[in-house]
Image (tube, helix red, strand yellow):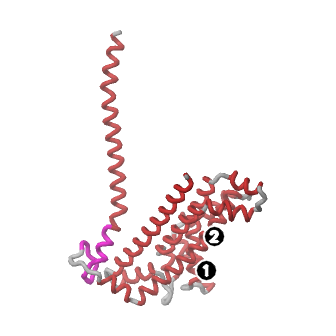
Amino acid sequence: MTSHAQSAPTANATAPRLNLSKHLGNALFKGVCGLIFLFLLLPTVIVMPASFSATQYLSFPPSQWSLRWYVAYFQDPEWIAATLFSLKVAGLTTVAAVVLGTMGALALMRGRMPLKGAMRAVVLAPMIVPHIVIAVAMYMVYMKWNLLGSLTGFVLAHTVVCVPFVVINVSAGLQKMDPSLEMAAASLGANRLRAFRHVTLPLLGPSMATSAAFAFITSLDEAVISYFLSSSTEKTLTRKMFEDIDFDLSPTIAVVSTLIIVVSVLLMGTIEGLRARAARRAKV
């Protein structure tokens, strides 16, 4: 009886200590996550106010506020030409990457082929290999093929970089998909193409939309490969930004950075809204 009476107070005294340790651990974890988030968000917090500076140079915080450099950006034919070229490259790259990446994901997830693991590694390699290595290799090949500075060359290069994002997203969508739905379509007389069009493709819609967003943003933001492949006449927005950093460090660079951030946030927000809407419909 005495031993039981002594153990009860000991257990009661240990419980508050465990709760305190748990709360301290949670607080420390949240604090570290908050610091990491702040570190990642800090460049955005700095560059956006700098784009509204009225001075001739980049400054934070701006001493005077103005839309002067936004007007200068939209009135500069070189900046507009680079922007339109980047948007064209990103658009075509998105289409090519989504088509090829979806086909690759279907082959890797549903196909029966030898060396599937090696093929997956090759497809995903551009996510691991440094872009400077890819850029040098493509520069050497493009010199022989006369593709430097061409729209075709940019689209091919950016597609190589963007396809892995599509493969990963579409593969995740295929893993969540119930294979019995395709089997049911086949049992009702649908061939593979018809089952893909009416069953698989609609179910993969959210994954493909997410893949398209990632591909577009990746192509628009790609700098290293674009720097190597650009010419004096055809250059992307990122190449133009590099040139201005070297020769004319004006707040126009902050303006372009802000516009890219806004486009990326709006695109990802739209995709997330569509995914949430699809999830609500699936529950109904």
Which label belongs to residue 41? Answer: none
Residue sitting at 21 percent across and 78 percent down? Answer: 64
Check disc 2 and report the residue beneath it: 99
Q: The residue under label 1 is which amino acid type? A: Val
Residue at far left of view: 63
Magenta residue check for 46: yes
Q: Tag 1, which secondary structure?
A: helix
Above or below, 32 relative to 75: above
Above or below, 274 relative to 50: above
Tell me the quarter of the picture where residue 101 sits: bottom right
Residue at far top of view: 1
Q: The residue under label 2 is which amino acid type? A: Val
Q: Residues within 10 Å of mark 2 (few under 14, many from 20)?
A: some
In this picture, which residue range is highlighted in magenta? 45-61
Residue sitting at 24 percent across and 72 percent down? Answer: 61
Check disc 1 and report the residue beneath it: 141
